[in-house]
Image: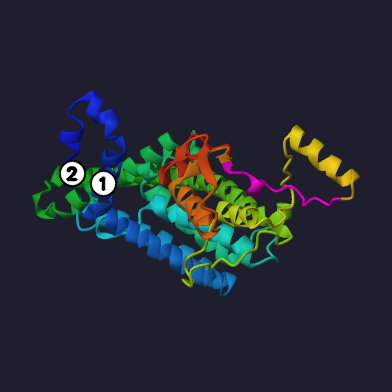
């Protein structure tokens, strides 16, 4: 159908909306995509439930997701399983870890600059991240690894080469060696010992450098977890509407939805100021002189509301903005939603930790 509708430029322009919906539906129905999305959605629900419990429970779940991504990596190497079977990728685990730290900052207000988790809990998370990167540095293009990727790749290739040589050596029958080779074994042992010491030292240096980079990553996560405490409206609870508006305990809503619900309900939002037109102000000031009180101007009084998110907006936020308008019971309002760009999950990771990040 999409090919038929897009057979000419005029038809493509005329039916672009239907074509986009059809392509999106096909992608959503693709088993390779739906399995991964279902696994990720279930993981988010588990994090939300764990965040209502204790910080220890939440940290354990984050670590579990990272370890599961490692299992998926081993399976891909062996050709047994992969993301298509619903196994979380390392990128997915990073997404979930970011979400987990933000949830920890929201649910555990005692979290300070040292992070929402204990030293032991966070150390386990760091070890899992280090192990994942050492086993396959190319699984995620992370900006904090800039300048270290070549060394990590070299180290991985060396380990693979040594494993191959060991497997090959184990297959050699010692009876096939002639007597002349026995006399050289002592010298080879000395060379192997020196080479082994150098490799151990190089490995230690690389791991220390990688751990320093990972420590910086977690300092960034600490900042994310403290966003609520540093944002006045969020800190004061001005936007703390119930996370559950539909009866579903997992249906947590985003900041844009909560903001629009308050605006459309004509509730005050700290830090948000609305100024009506100059002509309107003149009329209202004139009414006040005659003792006719006028209601405080509100953004919801307008028939058209433009919502623009600097930095980008994602598909979930667009949907939630539409839901907020629908639930407001104001069919007379036309809402135009936009942003610097339309963000995908991969874009979000790239902005936070990838080449486009400021971290």
In the image, residue 266 above or below residue 305: below
- Left or right of 302? Residue 47 is left
Looking at the rendered structure, which numbered label has been put on residue 181?
A: 2
Looking at the image, the residue that sits furthest to the left is 176
Q: Residue at x 74, y 44 (%)?
A: 273
| Quarter of the image with the N terminus in it | top left
Residue 336: x percent and y percent? Answer: 51, 40
In the image, residue 12 above or below residue 47: above
CB atoms at circles 1 and 2 under 8 Å apart? yes
The front one of 331 and 324 is 331
Q: Residue at x 53, y 56 (%)?
A: 324
Secondary structure state at the residue bearing disc 2: helix
The front one of 108 and 112 is 108
Task: Indicate yes or no whether the magenta region holds residue 304.
Answer: yes
The answer to which image quadrant residue 305 occupies is: top right
Looking at the image, the residue that sits furthest to the front is 290
Q: Which residues are magenta?
A: 292-305
In the image, residue 342 above or below residue 234: above
| Quarter of the image with the C terminus in it | top right
Residue 289: x percent and y percent? Answer: 90, 44
Q: Main secondary structure of the magenta part?
A: loop
Residue 170: x percent and y percent? Answer: 18, 54
Q: Residues within 10 Å of mark 2 (few under 14, many from 20)?
A: few
- Left or right of 107? Residue 2 is left
- Left or right of 33? Residue 266 is right
Q: CA distance from mark 1 to mark 2?
A: 7 Å
Q: Residue at x 61, y 54 (%)?
A: 264
Looking at the rendered structure, which numbered label has been put on residue 185?
A: 1
Residue 39: x percent and y percent? Answer: 34, 62
Looking at the image, the residue that sits furthest to the top is 9
Task: Indicate yes or no whether the magenta region holds residue 131.
Answer: no
């Amino acid at each position: 159908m999409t090919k038929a509708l897009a057979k000419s430029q005029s038809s493509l322009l005329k039916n672009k909306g239907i074509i986009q919906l059809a392509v999106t539906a096909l992608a959503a129905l693709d088993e390779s995509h739906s399995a991964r999305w279902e696994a990720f959605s279930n993981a988010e629900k588990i994090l939300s439930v764990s965040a209502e419990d204790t910080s220890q429970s939440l940290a354990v779940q984050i670590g579990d997701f990272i370890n599961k991504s490692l299992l998926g990596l081993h399976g891909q190497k062996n050709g047994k399983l992969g993301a298509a079977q619903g196994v979380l990728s390392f990128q997915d685990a990073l997404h979930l870890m970011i979400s987990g730290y933000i949830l920890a900052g929201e649910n555990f207000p005692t979290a300070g600059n040292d992070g929402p988790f204990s030293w032991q809990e966070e150390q386990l998370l760091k070890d899992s991240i280090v192990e994942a990167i050492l086993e396959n540095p190319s699984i995620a293009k992370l900006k904090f690894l800039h300048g270290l990727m070549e060394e990590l790749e070299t180290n991985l290739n060396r380990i693979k080469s040594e494993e191959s040589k060991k497997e090959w050596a184990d297959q050699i029958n010692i009876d096939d060696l002639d007597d002349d080779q026995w006399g050289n074994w002592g010298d080879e042992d000395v060379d192997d010992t020196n080479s082994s010491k150098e490799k151990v030292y190089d490995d230690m240096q690389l791991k220390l450098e990688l751990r320093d980079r990972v420590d910086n990553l977690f300092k960034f996560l600490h900042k994310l977890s403290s966003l609520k405490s540093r944002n006045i409206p969020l800190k004061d609870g001005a936007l703390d509407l119930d996370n559950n508006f539909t009866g579903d305990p997992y249906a947590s809503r985003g900041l844009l939805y909560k903001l629009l619900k308050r605006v459309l309900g004509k509730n005050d939002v700290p830090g948000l100021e609305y100024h009506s037109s100059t002509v309107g102000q003149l009329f209202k000031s004139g009414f006040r002189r005659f003792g006719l009180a006028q209601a405080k101007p509100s953004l919801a009084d307008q028939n058209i509301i433009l919502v623009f998110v600097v930095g980008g907006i994602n598909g979930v936020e667009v949907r939630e903005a539409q839901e907020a308008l629908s639930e407001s019971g104001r069919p007379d309002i036309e809402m135009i939603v936009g942003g610097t760009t339309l963000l995908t999950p991969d874009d979000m990771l790239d902005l936070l930790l990838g080449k486009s990040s400021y971290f």
